Amino acid sequence: MICCMTAPRWSASSRTTKSFERRWRDDVLPSLAAHGANYHLGTGPRQIQSTVDQLRADLKANPLPTPDGPPVDHNALDAPCWMR
């Protein structure tokens, strides 16, 4: 395996994106569905994905203002928490 520190930037970021997407699909969506009463995003992975997609579209069209920083837009849903 090529280390992300020595691989070309596009190659490493491509693998990272695929990894995040796989974790979202295989781990996060089922977990959110299992705890649907807590998160109120839907009862199954497809419904939750649809809710998140709609939220992303709404935030893109109407970013939420914040008192001390830039508005929260659709990009906030795409960046891992340590990259913000």
Image: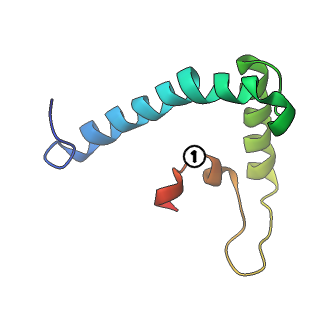
**In the picture, residue 67 is in which quadrant?**
bottom right
Could you say where residue 51 lies in the image, as x and y percent from the top left? Answer: 80, 32
Callout 1: helix, strand or loop? loop
Residue visible at 76% across and 29% down in the picture: 35
Left or right: 53 in relation to 15? right
Is residue 40 something that shows in the picture? Answer: no
Q: Position of residue 77 (x, y in %)?
A: 64, 47
Residue visible at 73% across and 50% down in the picture: 60
Q: Residue 78 vs residue 52: left or right?
A: left
Residue 77 vs 17, above or below: the answer is: below
In the foreground, 43 or 37: 37
On the image, numbered disc 1 is attached to which residue? Answer: 78
Q: Is residue 6 left or right of residue 14?
A: left
Vertical position of residue 46 compared to residue 13: above or below: above
Identified at 74% across, 35% down, the residue is: 52
- Work out which quarter of the rendered image holds the N terminus and state it: top left
* Farthest bottom residue in view: 68
Q: Quadrant of residue 62?
A: bottom right
